Image (tube, rainbow, N blue to C red):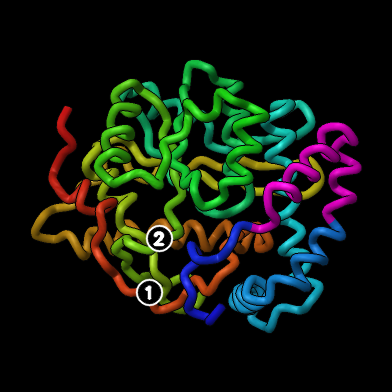
Amino acid sequence: MSNHEHWQSRPEGGGRFAIWLIRTIALYGGRRLGRLCLYPITLYFYLRRGPERLASRQYLQRVFGRPGTPWQVIRHIHCFAATILDRIFLLAHGERPFEIETQGLELLEQRVALGRGVLLFGSHQGSFEALRAIGARRPEMPLRVVLDKQKTPAMTELLEALAPEIGNCVIDAAQDGTTIALAMAEACRSGAVVAMLADRGRGHEVLRRTEFLGSPAPFPISPWLLAHVLQAPVVLCFGLYLGGNRYRLVFEPMSDRVEIPRDNRGPALDALIARYAQRLEHYIHVAPYNWFNFYDFWQDTPAVAGPAVAAVVGDRVSA
């Protein structure tokens, strides 16, 4: 892989057999045995996945101000592997094996009470899966997740086998942009919390750069255009893995109504993306090994309009 290869071109880690094996060990041997297996798995990926190893080292250099050491890179990969393993237990057993603390949950609940739905923007940081624990605690607060099921098919099959009902909660981001936007609009009209990750652009998306960890980095504009179209409150969510069985879910209100004027679209988008990037950078410094973009995030990616953007550039989605 060249340093500028897009993240979507990278193969899924492991495969169906490897993921089935980890699932079997985890569910029948318990979480302790599953976590012991993470050490050889981490070492294997450190040795075999050179591009990801390089991307981790470069990212850690931005965070710590010095080149990432092999031990730091291994720790970064292990943290990622631990959150993947915990997804199995979160779906199979709920939050019982975990200590999940929340910060700002009441602020999220206040916006859900408005009845317009809520857009929950997260990042590839820690565990977005821990959000399902909140859904179990608050059954009156339905959760829909925008997720590309085609990027990690083996993991998607495993998760849906463990919890078949989650398939009904997913809005597949691999669909065309119009279908995604309409599904999100319907979910918001029903008062649901619609969660999506806002730090990584797909190959066909328009991106805009903002300062992030020392230099400009590209972020997708489509989450913010969707927020403008849907007119639902936006809340940021950071699901931090604190080690062991501990997680912290942080909710921060971003905007009760995103407005992007037609004649001032660029600056308005830049301001929204910059604010999001600043909060993401803050939590990266809180938990630096939690950010899981194992590719050159700062690469020069062409901004090409695609269907995901075309679906939402109008002022409103039809009711």
Q: Are marks 1 and 2 in contact (CB under 8 Å)?
A: yes
Instruction: Identify the residue shown where x is 65% and y is 42%.
Output: 248
Residue 18 covered by magenta stretch: yes
Instruction: Identify the residue shown where x is 76% and y is 70%.
Output: 46
Mark 1 vs mark 2, CA separation in Å: 10 Å
Q: How many marks?
A: 2
Name above or below for residue 158 compared with residue 285: above
Q: Position of residue 56 (x, y in %)?
A: 65, 72
Name above or below for residue 228 compared with residue 193: below
Q: The residue tagged with tag 1: helix, strand or loop?
A: loop
**Label at residue 201:** 2
For the record, the magenta segment spans 13-38
* Circle 2 crowding by C-alpha within 10 Å: few under 14, some 14–19, many from 20: many
Q: Which residue is mark 1?
A: 301
Residue 39 covered by magenta stretch: no
* Circle 1 crowding by C-alpha within 10 Å: few under 14, some 14–19, many from 20: some
Q: Amino acid at mark 1?
A: Thr
Q: The residue tagged with tag 2: helix, strand or loop?
A: loop
Q: Quadrant of residue 97?
A: top right
Instruction: Identify the residue shown where x is 14% and y is 61%.
Output: 264
Q: Amino acid at mark 2?
A: Gly
- Which circle's residue, 1 or 2, is located before the other in the chain? 2
Name above or below for residue 55 compared with residue 200: below
Q: Nearer the viewer, residue 317 or 100?
A: 317
Q: Nearer the viewer, residue 194 or 63?
A: 194
- The reply, left or right, for residue 293 in relation to residue 176 is right
- The reply, left or right, for residue 50 in relation to residue 259 is right
Q: In what quadrant of the picture does the C terminus appear? A: top left
Q: Main secondary structure of the magenta part?
A: helix
Q: Quadrant of residue 130?
A: top right
Q: Position of residue 114 (x, y in %)?
A: 33, 24
